[in-house]
Image: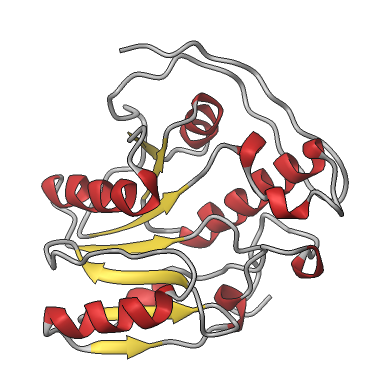
């Protein structure tokens, strides 16, 4: 199954982005980082379609560049853990490959279905713990330490409404329920698993971008736990 590649190089300060187009196949990237017991899974929406609610503040190219820059920041924050990117867009797949991430191609599944499929696939590859991080965290850093507790860890957004990061055992059968009010639903789901549950407040991971007032400049090189 092949999908025609395309080249999109969004621009517009203070954001950075740009990837080379490439054919996408339903297979893993051969030179992705090797997977061990822990991994980070990042669902990434097509850059060209991301952050539509920012259209009153940013142009289309600026929104695409912002989405790419934030995704770069999240992947940098995952180091030294290997990363898998779940997506259904050729540009995103090419970008993920260029960053050494494993591409999990899941078209038409929606966010919850795509994340669950990604977790299941990582489990099949021997991963024991998965950290699921949204791609729109402009201040993200040190995702490694989020997984330093047993059971389930939930990192809410700064309003206590959404769930920006979730750490779960890969075989927990956790049912994801993203969308407005997801943090409350994920707390219930975490309790259902019977595993220890930790709520972690991290300012760097709590900040996501949905509205024009949320926008901040993005550095792709996290320097500290709360940069």
- Number of numbered discs overlaid on the protein picture: 0
Quadrant of the image occupied by residue 150: bottom left
* Residue sitting at x 19%, y 55%: 127
* Residue sitting at x 41%, y 43%: 85
| In-image side of 41 versus 160 (left or right) | left
Q: Is residue 220 placed above or below 224 in the rendered structure?
A: above
* Residue sitting at x 76%, y 33%: 10
How far across and down, in percent of the image, does residue 167 sit?
Answer: 31, 71
How far across and down, in percent of the image, does residue 219 sit?
Answer: 73, 58
| In-image side of 102 versus 150 (left or right) | right
Which residue is more in the foreground, 66 or 188?
A: 188
Q: Is residue 74 placed above or below 197 in the rendered structure?
A: above
How far across and down, in percent of the image, does residue 63 sit?
Answer: 75, 45
Q: How is the image coloured?
A: secondary structure
| In-image side of 44 versus 116 (left or right) | right
* Residue sitting at x 73%, y 48%: 66
Q: Is residue 20 placed above or below 111 in the rendered structure?
A: above
The quarter in which the N terminus is drawn is top left
The quarter in which the C terminus is drawn is bottom right
How far across and down, in percent of the image, does residue 89 sit?
Answer: 49, 29
Q: Is residue 227 placed above or below 2 in the rendered structure?
A: below
Quadrant of the image occupied by residue 68: top right
Quadrant of the image occupied by residue 61: top right
Which residue is more in the foreground, 21 or 108?
A: 108
């Amino acid at each position: 199954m092949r999908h025609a590649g395309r080249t999109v190089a969004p621009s517009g300060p203070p954001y950075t982005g740009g990837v080379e187009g490439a054919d996408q196949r339903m297979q893993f990237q051969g030179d992705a980082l090797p997977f061990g017991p822990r991994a980070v899974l990042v669902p990434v929406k097509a850059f060209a379609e991301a952050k539509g609610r920012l259209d009153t503040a940013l142009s289309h190219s600026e929104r695409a560049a912002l989405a790419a820059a934030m995704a770069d920041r999240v992947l940098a924050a995952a180091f030294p853990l290997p990363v898998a990117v779940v997506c259904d867009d050729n540009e995103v797949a090419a970008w993920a490959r260029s960053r050494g991430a494993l591409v999990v191609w899941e078209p038409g599944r929606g966010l919850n279905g795509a994340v669950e499929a990604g977790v299941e696939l990582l489990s099949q590859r021997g991963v024991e713990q998965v950290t699921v991080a949204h791609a729109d965290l402009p201040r993200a850093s040190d995702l490694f330490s989020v997984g330093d507790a047993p059971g389930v860890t939930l990192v809410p957004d700064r309003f206590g409404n959404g769930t920006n990061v979730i750490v779960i055992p890969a075989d927990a059968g956790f049912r994801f329920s993203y969308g407005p009010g997801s943090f409350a639903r994920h707390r219930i789901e975490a309790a259902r698993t019977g595993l220890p549950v930790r709520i972690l407040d991290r300012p760097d991971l709590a900040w996501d971008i949905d509205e024009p007032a949320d926008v901040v400049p993005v550095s792709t090189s996290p320097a500290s736990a709360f940069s």
